Image: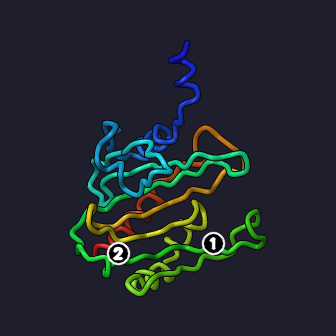
Amino acid sequence: MLEKLKEITRDKTRDNLYKNLLDIGLKCNLAERGIVEEKLFNPWHRKSLGIIKINSDYPIKYINIIKKWGSKNDPPRWWIYFAIPTPTSNSEEDYAEVKSIRKKSIPIFGRVKSIDWKSNNNGKNLANKFTNDSEINSLSFKLGDIKVQSLHENFSGYSIELEFNRARFPMLSAPNVTMNISQWNTLNKIAKMCID
């Protein structure tokens, strides 16, 4: 009975995304729990729900699902990190960051009207490319906020952070964690831009 209750209340965000990726034709698997990749963007006040390894031929090689538990006035949040392992420098001075700003007709609850891209100095070139790419803008418009960061020191490469459109009410698992093959290909288009 206790095991059944645990299964009912368990956060199934990773399972749901895994099934979605299989449905759109990707070769992937659920990694064992506790592997080092779970530490990617996982500070003490959040929890990794586990890794999905991508076995198809894409620059994105694994996905880390991170959850921040909610409180009385703050619903839980989930972030999906798409990792692109590739050699990068060990210096934080080379850190690049680009993030989407979704401008809404009415703050918080309004419809998204447009996408702006903000960056640090090292990310300006990428921000310009994203601004001029309709597929990348559409991805943020439809799925949620996107942040691209270069990785240094403990991890090497780049990460695409996607916070799917947030729930307005507390939920056990993240809502709307789905994408189609076109959106997956656009994520990998971003990954290729980072590597090139």
- SS for callout 2: helix
The secondary structure type at the circle numbered 1 is strand
- Count of numbered tags: 2
- C-alpha separation, residue under disc 2 versus residue under disc 1: 21 Å
Q: Amino acid at mark 2?
A: Met
Q: Is residue 31 left or right of residue 65?
A: left
Where is residue 110, by image quadrant? bottom right
Residue located beneath label 2 in the image:
193
Residue furthest right as drawn: 106
13 or 27: nearer the viewer: 13
Q: Residue at x 36, y 56 (%)?
A: 40
Residue 63 lies left or right of residue 61; in this view the side is right
User: Is 117 rendered above or below residue 22?
Assistant: below
Q: Residue at x 67, y 75 (%)?
A: 103
Residue 10, image x and y in percent?
53, 31
Left or right: 157, with 68 as reference point: left
Where the N terminus falls, by quadrant?
top right
Mark 1, other Cα within 10 Å: few <14 / some 14–19 / many ≥20: some
Provide residue 157's location: percent of width, then percent of height. Answer: 28, 67
Q: Is residue 84 above or below residue 102?
A: above
Q: Residue at x 56, y 69 (%)?
A: 138
Residue 149: x and y in percent read: 40, 70
The residue identified by callout 1 is 102
Q: Looking at numbered disc 1 in the image, what kind of residue is underneath it?
A: Arg
Specify whether 22 is left or right of 146.
left
Tell me which colouring the rendered structure shows.
rainbow
Dot placed on the residue nearer the N-terminal end, 2 or 1: 1
Report x, y in % for residue 74: 68, 51
